[in-house]
Image (tube, helix red, strand yellow):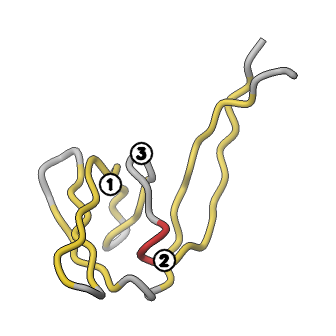
Amino acid sequence: MSRLTVRTLEVTGDGVRVGDVIAVGGVPHTVGDVRQVLPDRRRLEFEDGNAYVLGRARTIRVVRTSVDRPG
């Protein structure tokens, strides 16, 4: 049986992944796409249509889920 794990992590902008949940202004947004727009910037496109540009070295808190498979 698989188990779903939910973790809160601090990552830099270049560590943000699709599926991460980020709170912007206290409102949670799920990352739908991540694109590099400048050498030091990433554009996070959220599933709700909003977007946010984040510096690659900027630290941000994300909620990340993963499925742990028995092994």
Q: Residue furthest left?
A: 49
> Dot 3, crowdedness within 10 Å: few (<14), some or many (≥20)?
some
Q: Where 4 falls versus 16 (above or below)?
A: above
Q: Give how far across and how far down residue 48 sits, in percent.
A: 18, 46
Q: Residue furthest right?
A: 71
Q: Nearer the viewer, residue 65 or 16?
A: 16
Identity of the amino acid at label 2? Ile
Q: Give how far across and how far down residue 21 sits, in percent.
A: 43, 54
Residue holding disc 3: 19
> Dot 1, crowdedness within 10 Å: few (<14), some or many (≥20)?
many
Mark 2 touching mark 1, by CB under 8 A?
A: no
Q: Quadrant of residue 13?
A: bottom left
Point 14% across, 59% down: residue: 50
Between discs 2 and 1, the one toward the N terminus: 1
Q: Where 56 falls versus 22 (above or below)?
A: below
Q: Nearer the viewer, residue 17 or 25?
A: 17
Mark 1 touching mark 3, by CB under 8 A?
A: no
Residue holding disc 2: 60
Image check: 11 left or right of 68?
A: left
Residue holding disc 1: 29
Disc 2 from disc 3: Cα separation: 15 Å
Q: Give how far across and how far down residue 18 sits, in percent.
A: 38, 49
Image check: 69 left or right of 48?
A: right
